[in-house]
Image (tube, grey):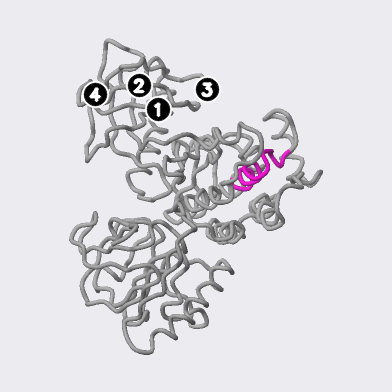
Amino acid sequence: MNSFPLTVPTGYEVGGWTVERPLGAGAFGSVYAARHTGTGTGTSDGRGDLPARAALKFLPTGTHTPRQLRHLRDLADREVDLLRRLRSPRLIRLYETLTVDDPAHPELDGATVLVLEEAERPLQSLLSGAGAPPAGPALLVQICEGLQQLHTAGWVHGDLKPGNVLLMKDGSVRLGDFSTASELEGTHAYAAGFATPDYTPPELLWSEVGDRGARIRPSADVWAFGILAHTVLTGASPLPGGTPSARRDAALRYARGEEELRLSPELPDVWRELVTDCLSRTHEERAAHDAASVLRRARRAAADRPPRLRRRDRPRRPRRPSGAGLTTRLATAAAAALVVAALGLVMLRDAPSAEAAQGYERCPIGHACFFSERDGQGEMCGWYDDEEDWQKGIIVCDWGRDSAPRSAVNNGYQGDPLDDVQYYRGAAYEEPLGCLQSNEARNLSPVAVRSLKWLPDC
């Protein structure tokens, strides 16, 4: 385990949380498992509903120089700012922030504490054994979903690596550690310049760091995803060398055209093409492959495996049409949807062009979609996971603010244990309005909808 920048003793209490055991550490923060006990010292800047257990990330102040204190405060502020502003099923959840108020422990006094969703373990733990994890392709899809959500919201992660990919108890993935994340200002953002060299693109390895940090672009995350994908699928880095410094030098030689990538023969062809594009030598070449396009290709490479856990022993029920003549249309739509998914044309929102799919067939496989007009016409909003507020999530249904959906379709994954969709009038799943069972399409009464949840049955 990494050395801890800040050591917190077992049983230490802060802001109603009691520390139980260490979970991990990075360059600047220490993370501990904790349970909520309702006692302890510390000040909070706002509590909501708190879980029984959480992970506490301690960002130290302690005995540092004023310059170091400003730097550590900036890192804490970056992470808190991002997690407060972005809500996404692929980003670790922030419950509250605390400040330790404990003069009796000067090494802890003044530390910032992030109270985060507790994960089962980091992805790194799966890569320390022999061979590639069998669930690797599905995990990579979820990682890429997190990047796409970050980039859509205007942020760059800046330090994507196995230690910052968190596996939850249900098998799903969250991205974590946003202390070096940066918000875009046009085409660039400014990062602290402390990313892990093994996952840093060549242009940043020799870049100058100014007063605001190093200039960084979303293509840096695409490079890191390429390294991560190769590592997850083969158990080895695509850059030769037995140490981080050797691999850094190999990356620089590759960027200068002095040597090629050394991709493993175990890498399937479809992933080989994707990894090669993610690891294009220059930012300009890599920029052609943004997170959205990489996600589409990753889904195709993983055979469109869903982010949710699936059970394969349940047959898919036929959609129940809402009127005469709809059965034929839906059969055609279902076939078209499979073609669309196979081509990787997955859309999270917005209607496509006139040349693309029409009606219910616009809804990507794995999604529940709502339309502004009857029979799947008009504008569309779709979700592949629970959404507790259509107007505040990472995927916002703009037209839903002023008008109610008039039709909907459940195009969820075949055999998924969560294959029914309950939709609600209010945010946070308040006032249930109706249910869409697996593969069902129907016209709706014009009533405002604000949230939805995937369920085994409803």
The residue tagged 3 is: 2
Counting from the top left corner in percent of width and height, residue 306 is at: 49, 57
From this viewpoint, which residue is outermost toward the bottom?
A: 325
Find out whether residue 234 is within the magenta segment: yes
Q: Quadrant location of residue 113?
A: top left
Of the two numbered discs 2 and 4 on the same chain, state the one appearing first in sequence.
2
Highlighted magenta segment, given as a residue range: 225-239
Of the two numbered discs 4 and 1 on the same chain, state the one appearing first in sequence.
4
The residue tagged 4 is: 42
Q: Which residue is pictured at 35% across the width and 29% down the height?
A: 56
CA gap, disc 2 and disc 4: 17 Å
Q: Amino acid at mark 1?
A: Arg
**Under tag 2, what secondary structure?**
strand
Residue 314 image label:
none
**Under tag 4, what secondary structure?**
loop
Q: Are marks 3 and 1 in contact (CB under 8 Å)?
A: no
CA gap, disc 3 and disc 4: 26 Å
CA gap, disc 1 and disc 2: 29 Å
CA gap, disc 3 and disc 1: 24 Å
**Under tag 3, what secondary structure?**
loop
Residue 20 image label:
2
The residue tagged 1 is: 70
Counting from the top left corner in percent of width and height, residue 158 is at: 52, 42
Q: Are marks 2 and 4 in contact (CB under 8 Å)?
A: no
From this viewpoint, which residue is outermost toward the left?
A: 431
Of badges 2 and 4, nearer the viewer stands 2
